[in-house]
Image (tube, rainbow, N blue to C red):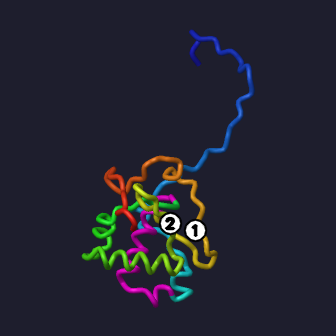
Amino acid sequence: MNLAHKHEPPQAEVVQFPKQERVTMASKQEGYTRTPNYLVDDDYVAEMSGNTLKCYVVLNRFTEGFSRQNWAIDSKFLLKKTGIKKPHTLFESLKYLEEKGLISVERLDGKPSRFSISNPCQKTALVSTSHAEKGHNTHAEKGHNTHAEKGH
């Protein structure tokens, strides 16, 4: 106890609030991003091509894996992460996922398209409260913004 300072009794009651959990991305140490069971249970994986599965895995990683419900994506980034060589093949895979209800795509003129993981059993995209919908940029890795090609 410091005798140089006289400690006054508190003038108000101190209320302890519960600590809020910080939303973070799945880390490399954890080593995984959750994948919905319906992909296997409802035979989506059995019916889709390898390239389509790669697209889904990457979209899932950069949405759900970063604790966000949607993501503005650059096709070059997606081509790099999936290993798909031809843009046409990429867009066919994305079209398949959208037609099956596994992803939702919000296309805006002059702005990046936003991709969301959807549950085809619910027939609706998951509702987002992410920073992206509040007007903040989304970032992929190393601080680069992500943007989509117009119309895709």
**Mark identifier at residue 87:** none
Examine the image and state in which quarter residue 91 appears.
bottom left
What secondary structure is found at the residue carrying circle 2? strand
Examine the image and state in which quarter residue 79 appears.
bottom left
Identify the residue position indicated by label 2 in the image.
116
Identify the residue position indicated by label 1 in the image.
125
Residue 19: x, y in percent?
Answer: 62, 44
The image shows residue 5, relative to residue 35, as above or below, that is above
Is 13 placed left or right of 80 in the picture?
right
Q: Measuring 34% from the left and 62% from the top, which residue is drawn there?
A: 74
Q: What amino acid is found at the position of numbered circle 2 in the picture? A: Ser
Q: What amino acid is found at the position of numbered circle 1 in the picture? A: Ala
Q: Extreme top residue here? A: 4
The image shows residue 58, relative to residue 12, as above or below, that is below
- Which region is colored magenta? 44-68
The disc, 2 or 1, on the residue closer to the chain's N-terminal end is 2
Residue 8: x, y in percent?
Answer: 68, 15
The image shows residue 95, relative to residue 143, as above or below, that is below
**Labelled pair 2, 1 in contact (Cβ < 8 Å):** yes
Residue 7: x, y in percent?
Answer: 65, 15
What secondary structure is found at the residue carrying circle 1? strand
Q: Residues within 10 Å of mark 1 (few under 14, many from 20)?
A: some
Q: Measuring 31% from the left and 52% from the top, which residue is drawn there?
A: 142
Quadrant holding the C terminus: bottom left
Asked if the stretch drawn in magenta spans residue 15, the answer is no
Residue closer to the observer: 60 or 8: 60
Q: Measuring 28% from the left and 76% from the top, which residue is drawn there?
A: 84
